[in-house]
Image (cartoon, helix red, strand yellow):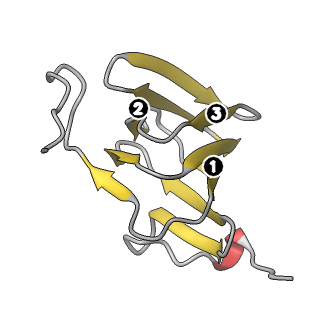
Amino acid sequence: MKHSSISRAEWRHGDWGPAYLVQGPTSDIGALLLRPGDEMANHLHDHCDESFVVIEGECTLWIDCKEKHTMRVGDVFRCEPGEMHYLINESDADFRLVFIKSPASPGDTVLLPWQPGDPAPMRAA
């Protein structure tokens, strides 16, 4: 058994960003904190699903640079392997979610820089 707590999260960017709470071998579980104006860069995963459970605030989620969703407390979303996803906190309050990647796939993140209004990025061959 493994145990962790969001209250002890080590955010990637100091006081915000993603933080892994429990890792492997079959799944990775973490949290994401976005302050107003913060974003999680557009990316995809080749081998794992990534699911999100919203626990605080509101955020915009873009799927494949064309589907726009508002994420609210209690919402659950799942991105399948190969689906690009980009999150931006356009509200005036903090946003938090729990994420689950399954199966655990270290190094599986492919960054594809994009901003709303830009053409969808092409993946290098």
**Sequence-wise, which precedes: disc 3 or disc 1?**
3
Using the numbered discs, state the Cα–Cα distance from disc 3 to disc 1 in whole angstroms: 11 Å
To which residue does mark 1 refer? 97
Rendered residue at 74%/74% (across/down): 5
Q: Amino acid at mark 2?
A: Glu
Element under disc 1 = strand
To which residue does mark 2 refer? 90
> x%, y% of residue 56?
67, 44
Looking at the picture, does residue 95 appear above or below residue 91? below
Q: Nearer the viewer, mark 3 or mark 2?
A: 3
Q: Residue furthest front?
A: 125
Element under disc 3 = strand
Q: Amino acid at mark 1?
A: Leu
- Quarter where residue 2 is shown: bottom right
Looking at the picture, does residue 27 appear above or below residue 34? below
Determine which of the numbered discs, if any, sits on residue 77 in the image.
3
Front in this rendered view, residue 104 or 85: 104
Q: Nearer the viewer, mark 1 or mark 2?
A: 1
> x%, y% of residue 118?
15, 23
